[in-house]
Amino acid sequence: MKRPLRVCFFGTYRERYVRNEVVIAGLRAQGVEVIECHSKLWRGVPDRVAQAGGGWKNPRFLLRVARAYWRLWQAHRRVGDYDVMLVGYPGQFDAIPGRLLSRLRGKPMALDILMSLHLIAEERGLAQKSPVTGRLIFWLEKLGLKQPDLLIADTPEYREYYSEKYGLPQEKFRLVPLGVDDRLYTPRPHLQPPHDHIRVIYYGTFIPLHGVETMLHAAAELRDQPHIRFDFYGAGQELPGIKRLAQELQLDNVRFHGWVDKERLPDEIARSHISLGVFGTTKQSMCTIQNKIWEGMMMQRAVITGDAPTIREELQHGEHVYLVPRANPQALAQGILELAGDEELRRRLGERGHERAQQNTIAATGQKVKCALEELL
């Protein structure tokens, strides 16, 4: 009897990040034996931002890096035989030692890229704050992306971006869309939105690519519609400025709730009529279909989000999601107003969006990743 595929899931990856959780669970759902080879390096988003802004020059951080990779090397020594190494996100830097260790074992290596670390640094202003750090991230990412035998990206746009920016052959890529943790995000018929008003929800990090300012200006456009109310959940670098903007606009129809545990988050989505997606115009925003879009669809709620070719390739306006021009508060406000007044449209988007999101479950994602890894063997 043929033994199952054995994958060494390698790196300083974010253990609780949805992409890593979905890929690991998805592979295991397909009968793959996943051996996690992990070392903790980062202490959360603020820590990564601080180091990318130039804090990495501190000898204490460099010592932390050395210790993390020493632990990773020791962890790899304890890993038994495996067929292929898969470097988890974010793993562009981890792919450099990963290439050495996988070659010592005579095994192929794949990298789940997901997002460009240099692009993130650029869009958050970190590369401008510390140009030396920006150049370092660029060259380390380029070196890391040239190491794997196979690269996994989530959209054709990201594949083309990486290929052009770093001179990578497109045939080296395989596409695996963002998956949804359907253990957590499932319809909750016992939880219903309020009957006395339309509840519009946004959740996530307050960063430029999400276009939260556009959402607030749309709320201002709808201030004379007291039956439409907005609830914002999350945190991030732009939150203080976003709260100031809400005060300046005198938005009585907007509430901020802070971060919420991801186990509780699906309940809040279920208690909403409309889920907001992404409305920013940054390169990163336009290259992917964000988690919150798939999650809202999986929760059987009407999702309204910014239009982009990336989204049009996968989702149909008025069928799976409601699309509006990006960075356009008036268009967003008009779309919300239409959804608020059309219960049948909301129901159709919820039902058909849920059907479409079923193609991106844990099991479906695991099958796609497994097929990509088996090609290396």
Image (cartoon, grey):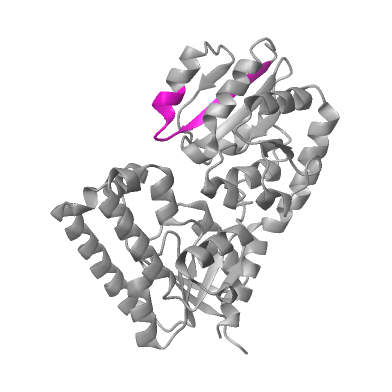
Residue 40 in view here: no
Q: What residue sits 55% from the left and 46% below the top?
A: 285
Figure quadrant of the N terminus: bottom right
Q: Nearer the viewer, residue 364 or 281?
A: 281
Residue occupying the point 39% across, 35% down: 237
Query: Residue at point 52% right, 49% down?
Result: 284
Question: As drawn, which residue projects farthest toward the right?
Answer: 344
Q: Is residue 346 above or below residue 51?
A: above
* In this rendering, position of residue 60 left or right of residue 144: left
Would residue 23 appear left or right of 35 to someone viewing this image? right
> What residue span does the magenta drawing correspond to?
228-242
Asked if the stretch drawn in magenta spans residue 40, the answer is no
Q: Is residue 356 left or right of residue 328?
A: right
Please say whether residue 347 is visible from this viewpoint: yes
Instruction: From this view, report whether residue 336 is shown above or below residue 353.
Output: above
Relative vertical location of residue 118 with respect to residue 100 in this rendering, above or below:
above
Q: Is residue 252 left or right of residue 47?
A: right
**Rendered-image quadrant of the C terminus:** bottom right
* x and y, in percent, of residue 126 in the image: 34, 45
Asked if residue 324 is positioned above or below residue 257 in the image, the reply reads: below
230 falls in the magenta region? yes
| Depth order, front residue of 250/186 | 250
Q: Is 19 or 56 nearer to us in this picture?
A: 56
Residue 245 place in picture, x, y as percent: 47, 19
